[in-house]
Image (cartoon, rainbow, N blue to C red):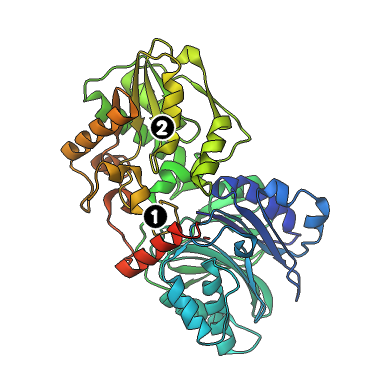
């Protein structure tokens, strides 16, 4: 999972890109990069760490001249988490900058194909072969002076060869003019939005919060399978590239997206309220009662508010979060996550001691974070502890750009080792929850059912991590290759 931002304007874009990337920081903390286009030059600066640190010195942004550019924050799912893998990437011939969010599942095949044409990849990041395919197709059409027809044909050829899920932005000269391209693959699993300023400048980003930070109005989601060609002061040119079959990622709504983001015209926070209400109904049907509802900050707060309203119990803030800590889910290894958690949360004893508490979280992936949090909770002297999760159990790996690990690393697989596509039956889920609750030393554990997820979020979407139904097929050999990569060098999207 990563965050991208492309801007084309009638003014220098580097300050805008830096500002917008900070709004996308929750999507990646591994590295940050900005490349601008200034005539024949491509000023760039990449660095490991947070945006505020990579662009701390004013002279860094001052060197990034030009009114067209792309920025990126990275959380790696394929690659090694090193500076060589930091996006955006530049192909010098014919001069194209590109960044993406997603996961290219046939990366190895593309690398071999490119090598057969003496095109060498310089990183392990899976956007680089996409960029090289696109640039190679452009040069094959003509050496320079590329037209919109050239771009559309090259992108169509690239999309046909590329498997997986991705949204991307690219910057180059088209018909002799600086141009920003935005494209979302036909499945639309990874998000993308389009924004416009009052002056007619354009931006494309992973989430609408980046547009808000720039003062741009959100025009809408990037249309799956369609190329948008953006220039300041002009309406977008649209070219259909592939036939869409949109299945946006539901885990964006549950965890990754900021609650103030808007997708498909609806605030993410509204979706989390719906998940909390549905979860409360399922929990209440089990005959439990509580004195207060406490979220594990931050993502679960909206669901916890709705849960509390539905069951008629007071909502309380029981944890103080260190605002300078990162998101433990997207840290590179278990040691980093454990160390971060020690300073991330501190419980408020008065909110737990002697009370029947419901602790709300968004999901359980590896399980280690929630174990440590519950260990802290038990030291606060609660009368009962009920853990509720406003998502179904994560039973299947994600191959589309979220680091859902390998099957053996998913905590739920220890309690449901061989789940069928479609999710667990309610009886199977309750049995799993009972055994897992005993290991966690809590009075109950309740996940939202897959049926509850379908009721709360009825739109067509990808929920493969919960139900095992992959909208974009990933053959077994490619799943094995991705798993070997994750077990080996670690996490480069």
Badge 2 is on which residue? 371
**Among the two numbered marks 1 and 2 on one chain, the one whose residue lies closer to the N terminus:** 1
Looking at the picture, does residue 248 appear above or below residue 177?
above
Q: Where's residue 394, x and y in %?
A: 33, 45
Q: Residue at x 36, y 32 (%)?
A: 276
Q: Would you identify the image quadrant in which residue 367 lies?
A: top left
- Label 2: few (<14), some (14–19) or many (≥20) C-alpha neighbours in 10 Å: some
Q: Would you identify the image quadrant in which residue 430 lies?
A: top left
Tell me, for residue 231, which label it has, or none.
Answer: none
Q: Would you identify the image quadrant in which residue 146 lies?
A: bottom right
Tag 1, which secondary structure?
loop
Give whichever of 10, 356 is nearer the camera: 356
Q: Residue at x 35, y 35 (%)?
A: 390
Give whichever of 224, 133 is nearer the camera: 133
Q: Where's residue 471, x and y in %?
A: 31, 61
391 with respect to 432 (left or right):
right
Give whichever of 89, 487 is nearer the camera: 487
Q: Where's residue 40, x and y in %?
A: 75, 76
Q: Residue at x 24, y 42 (%)?
A: 451
> Are the residues tagged 1 and 2 within 8 Å (C-beta)?
no
Q: CA distance from mark 1 to mark 2?
A: 30 Å
């Amino acid at each position: 999972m990563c965050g991208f931002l492309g801007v084309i304007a009638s003014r220098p874009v580097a300050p805008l890109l830096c500002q917008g990337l900070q709004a996308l920081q929750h999507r990646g903390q591994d590295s940050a990069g900005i490349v601008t286009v200034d005539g024949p030059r491509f000023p760039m600066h990449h660095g490991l760490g947070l945006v505020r640190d990579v662009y701390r010195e004013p002279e860094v942004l001052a060197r990034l001249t030009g009114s067209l550019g792309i920025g990126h924050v990275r959380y790696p799912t394929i690659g090694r988490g090193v500076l060589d893998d930091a996006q955006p990437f530049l192909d010098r011939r014919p001069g194209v900058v590109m960044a993406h969010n997603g996961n290219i599942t046939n990366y190895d095949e593309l690398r071999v194909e490119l090598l057969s044409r003496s095109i060498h990849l310089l990183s392990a990041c899976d956007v680089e072969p996409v960029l090289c395919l696109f640039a190679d197709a452009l040069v094959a059409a003509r050496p320079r002076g590329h037209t919109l027809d050239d771009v559309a044909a090259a992108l169509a050829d690239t999309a046909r060869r590329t498997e997986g899920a991705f949204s991307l932005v690219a910057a180059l000269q088209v018909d002799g003019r600086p141009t920003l391209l935005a494209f979302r693959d036909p499945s639309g699993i990874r998000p993308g939005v389009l924004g416009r300023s009052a002056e007619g400048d354009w931006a494309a980003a992973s989430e609408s919060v980046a547009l808000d930070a720039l003062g741009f109005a959100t025009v809408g989601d990037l249309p799956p399978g369609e190329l948008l060609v953006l220039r300041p002061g002009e309406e977008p040119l649209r070219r259909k590239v592939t036939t869409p079959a949109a299945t946006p990622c539901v885990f964006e709504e549950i965890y990754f997206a900021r609650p103030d983001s808007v997708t498909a015209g609806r605030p993410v926070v509204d979706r989390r309220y719906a998940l909390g209400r549905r979860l409360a109904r399922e929990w209440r049907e089990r005959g439990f009662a509580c004195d207060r509802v406490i979220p594990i900050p931050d993502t679960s707060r909206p669901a916890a508010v709705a849960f509390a309203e539905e069951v008629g119990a007071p909502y309380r803030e029981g944890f103080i979060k260190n605002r300078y800590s990162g998101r433990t889910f997207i840290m590179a290894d278990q040691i980093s996550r454990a160390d971060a958690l020690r300073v991330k949360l501190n419980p408020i004893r008065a909110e737990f001691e002697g009370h029947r508490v419901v602790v709300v979280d968004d999901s359980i992936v590896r399980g280690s974070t929630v174990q440590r949090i519950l260990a802290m909770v038990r030291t606060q002297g609660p009368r009962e502890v009920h853990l509720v999760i406003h998502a179904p159990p994560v039973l299947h790996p994600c191959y589309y750009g979220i680091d859902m690990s390998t099957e053996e690393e998913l905590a739920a697989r220890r309690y449901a080792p061989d789940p069928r596509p479609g999710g667990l039956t309610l009886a199977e889920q309750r049995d799993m929850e009972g055994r897992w609750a005993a290991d966690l030393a809590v009075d109950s554990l309740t996940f939202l059912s897959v049926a509850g997820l379908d009721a709360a979020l009825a739109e067509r979407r990808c929920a493969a991590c919960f139900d095992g139904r992959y909208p974009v097929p990933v053959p077994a050999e490619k799943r094995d290759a991705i798993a070997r990569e994750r077990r080996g060098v670690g996490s480069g999207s």
